[in-house]
Every structure is written in structure tokens, then in C-alpha cells.
Image: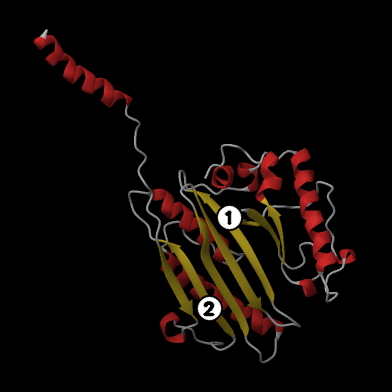
Amino acid sequence: MRHLSLLLIPLTLLVVGCNRKPTVEFVPVSYYSDTMKTDIDSLNYSDGDDLVQFEINLMLLQEDEKFPLLHSINNTVLTVALANDYYTPDPSYSGSEAIQHYCNTMHSARVAAYQEHESGEEPWSFYIKASPTLQTDKMLSFVVTNEQYMGGAHGMHSATYLHFSLATGNELTIDSLFVWNPKNHKAVEQLIYEGIRQLCVDDTEGVYSLDDFIFTPDGTNIISNFMVNPESLTFWFNPYDIAPYSLGGIGIEVPSYKLYDYLRKDAPLYLYWFKK
């Protein structure tokens, strides 16, 4: 019997080892900043150096070759921040490389456009910033802000919110976070519309009027830009999206509990809010 009990010990250890849950390797997330202002000497600008000014400040993920998803997230942020009709970042670029190429390409293009439009003496300016807004164990969020002045009575500004899975590196859109069928689409629109109505009711200075908004809960509004908060979503609309430029960007906050029925129950947003 003594020998039998000794034989059972390694067998027991083997069974325990087989039942142990596999560990999930933590994806390290840290940040660094790449910044550039218009620098005539380093960018070798020539004619029209003072006509166009850039200031770019991108806070990106510190990449690790063991976790290629970090580069994938950075590439999406760079694309949203910098890509336009004249320039698209190379997927292999680092942040500083993408900014350098952007400024070299865009300066000559913008100077040519400036001179073609005879915009007067005031220079055009472009300010781009990207920074993280939220990090959980399953998701990561950024905001990309863009301010530009290209002549005329006023400049333009916008904010674009991006969300990513830390398990895959894929972007998390409203379709991947919500059960986004027509019924739920209208229900979320109704919540936003109620927020717009309340914004007008609470406005004691007479800035907002419901007549100024082109948003009705009929299932046709584009709802894709939102900031994730600890207990709510702020649906963000840039100037001209749903109201005149004079009202600026408009954020409508909706509590998480009001969105519960429309969320995918396996998605990072639901897990963040309701499985803490």
C-alpha cells in the first residue's frame, strides 16, 4: 500500500497540472509623444515658408515586437490623424516618420493651394493632436483632434474618438459594441434626442434652440463618434453634423444603464461597465 500511495502522488500532480487554467499574457501599454512644429531648417522648406504652419502632437503606444497589435493600433491612430487627399501614412512608419513625411508632403501642397487662392497675408495653420482617453484591461480609447484655418471667417475643428480591443488590436466600432439593428438604432437615437431636448431646456442663456438641430430619431442619423466614460457614453457631433457651426461641437451624454439592453454582452464595453 505504501508503494501504491507513492505512485498516486505524481498522478495527482499530473491531473492538477492538466486542470490549471492557461494564463493570458498581459499586453503592456505605455505611451510616448511625437511632436513637430513647422521647422524650416529641418524640413528644407523653400518658397512660402511662412504661409503654412503645422503643429502636430501625437501620443502613441510604446511598441513591442512581441505584441504586433500595438503597432496596428498606432497605425490606425496615425491614419485617422494624418491621412487626407495628399498623404497616407506608410503602415511601416513610426510616429515620427509619419509626421515627418506628412509635413514634407503637406507643406508644398498647402503652400500651392494658398497661393492659388490668393488668401491674403494671414497664414494657414494646422493643429493635430492624438491622446488616450481611457484604458481598461480589455479596451483602449483615443481622441484625435484637428484644428485648421485656411482663410475665411473662421477655422474648422473636429474630434474623432477611436476604440480598440487589447485582445486583437482591432478597432471597436458601434457595430461591434452594440447589437446595432434598426430597432436598437432608433432607440439609441431617441436617447440622444432626449439629451438634445434637455440641453435646450437647461440653456439659460438662449444659445440652444431645438429648431437649430437637424437630428430626429428616425433611424437615419450617423452615430459613430462617442467617448467612453466610466458610467456613460458621450455621443459627439462635430460642427455642422447636427447643428450650425455657431453651436460648435456638441456632446450628448447617455448613462450606461440606459444603454444596457442594446449592448453586446460579450463586448469590452459591456464588460467594463457591468462586470467590474
Q: What's the distance in space between the residues labelled 1 and 2, CA to CA?
A: 31 Å
Q: Would you name the residue on which mark 2 appears?
A: 55
At 44% from the left and 83% from the top, the residue drawn is: 44
At 46% from the left and 84% from the top, the residue drawn is: 39
| Residue 230, numbered label | 1
**Quarter of the picture holding the N terminus:** top left
**Residue at the outermost bottom position:** 121
Q: Position of residue 238 (x, y in %)?
A: 71, 65
In this picture, is 275 found above or below 110?
A: above
In primary-sequence order, the first of circles 1 and 2 is 2
Q: Secondary structure at mark 1?
A: loop
Question: Label 2 amino acid?
Answer: Glu
**Side of 33 relative to 22 (left or right):** right
**Side of 271 relative to 74 (left or right):** right
Classify mark 1: residues with Cα within 10 Å, few (<14), some (14-19) or many (20+): few
Q: Secondary structure at mark 2?
A: strand
Residue 265: quadrant of the picture: top right
Q: Which marked residue is nearer to the observer: mark 1 or mark 2?
A: 1
At 81% from the left and 67% from the top, the residue drawn is: 202
In this picture, is 176 found above or below 12?
A: below
